[in-house]
Image (cartoon, rainbow, N blue to C red):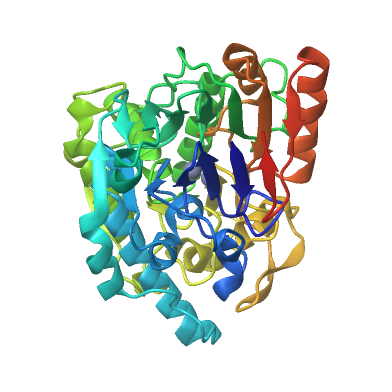
Amino acid sequence: MRITNLNPETDIGASAWHVNLEGHGLLMDSGMHPKREGRAGLPVFKTIADQEVDAIAVSHCHHDHVGSLPVALRHFPKAHVLLPEQSYFIIERVLHNSVNVMTRQRDELGIKEYPLYTHDEVDEIAPVFQGFRYNREIEWASFAKTRAGFSSPTLEFFDAGHTLGSAGILLRGRKETLFYTGDVCFHDQTILRAARFEDVKADVLIMETTRGNRATPKGFTREREIERLTAAIQRALKRKGSVLIPSFALGRTQEILALLALLMREGRLKEQPIYIGGLGRVFTEIYDLEAHRTHRQHTGMQLHEEHNLIVLDPGQVEKMKLSGRIFVLTSGMMSENTAAHDLAVRMMEDPRQSIFFVGYADPETPGGRLKASKPGETFVFSPGIGRVTHRCDVQDFDLTAHANRDDLLDFVGQVSPRAVLLGHGDDSARHWFEDQIRTRHPKIKIIQPQPGKTVEV
Ligand SMILES: [Zn+2]
Ligand SMILES: [Zn+2]
């Protein structure tokens, strides 16, 4: 089979993989690079311009995996889009939100190419989305080809435990198989249970490496991390300050809401409203609606009933009183023109206020720069705001929705592939995996495919 890495950059970047399996073309994910501006953030579609794409399979609805889907469909208008059924309810919301964000960036940052697609275009492509259950074999090749005597490859979604509707994808051809992890979590989170990849074996493995450069500290447990966060929130509220937890709207927000609900049930946190964003509310509703069809904990927990959720209107963040409130707001990396960014600016220089990170923030984003700053330090937060002084309480809690590197390494052993392709990670993360796999499994071929490069495996 032939595999092309379409990520325009060598970092986590935009996920998009083209696979040619026995004459059939499949695109897995079509993300957008979160740090590159304009068209430079798109996958390098031109390198597969002469290839066919019968179908596009989506691992999950984070922006770095689906953000360029409407553009991909312009290149491959005949492709169907296959996704896990829960993602089917999410994807259009994500894409419409992208149009809004890009439009705002055009107006405020002057990026003329934005938006790269329109609301109308998102509406027009909606009919090609098809939702499927996990662990069903789906035929995805074009009908014309299979009728002409070609084989009929299948794909199957495996629950990846990363966000609602997240999946690893197993491709089966007549002779060969491939497994793509997407973003995967091998431990239980507060709502979602761990990935169910137990039966997966494949000839070729494409694997995420997000946490390859992060060792698990001795004695670390998720429970202890939650205890530490709980104590920090209690202290913050006691001194009449507010708490901001910057979170992605899909996944992270609902995990934090569930955690806060449990703390309130146990009486460890006083019942009080939680302020969230509009998109966070929409996905919270979908988490509630899909509760009975999700492999999760606390299946009876409806986040809307547990909490008094208040949706912040744009601009409201500038005026609110900041005493004793809890905010769970996008974006997780505090990108400019988001509620989390604007609220952080207000909180930053007030020692009573607290900002608690619970997920990954790229070092080159406002959130990443705040995380890296020391108390009392003056630093450039974002181009729009410029320099600020870090005087509030900033802490980082490791409640990741990505697999720890040792679990991923064990997974390589389980899948026992002929070749493994390393993606979705920084250089140092991919190199750690390369070294470890070479030592543990000397027979496995290890490939770090460069942007736009095709490899034959
Ligand atoms: Zn993700
Ligand atoms: Zn990702």
- Horizontal side of 288 relative to 84 (left or right) equals left
Q: 255 and 167: which one is in front?
A: 167
Q: Residue at x 19, y 34 (%)?
A: 302
**How many circles with numbers are drawn on the protein?**
0
Q: Residue at x 24, y 41 (%)?
A: 131
Task: Point out residue 225 in the picture as x, y percentages from the top left corner.
Answer: 56, 26
- Horizontal side of 357 relative to 406 (left or right) equals left
Task: Point out residue 345 in the picture as x, y percentages from the top left corner.
Answer: 55, 68
Residue 3 against residue 321 in the figure, above or below: above
Task: Point out residue 159 in the picture as x, y percentages from the top left corner.
Answer: 38, 27
Q: Residue at x 27, y 26 (%)?
A: 265
Q: Residue at x 36, y 35 (%)?
A: 260
Q: 323 and 338: which one is in front?
A: 338
Residue 348 against residue 229 in the figure, above or below: below
Q: Is residue 273 visible?
A: no
Quadrant location, the C terminus: top right
- Horizontal side of 403 relative to 301 (left or right) equals right
Q: 441 and 381: which one is in front?
A: 441
Quarter holding residue 300? top left
Q: Is residue 73 visible?
A: yes
Farthest front residue?
A: 148
- Horizontal side of 345 relative to 242 (left or right) equals right
Quadrant location, the N terminus: top right
Task: Point out residue 304 in the picture as x, y percentages from the top left corner.
Answer: 19, 42
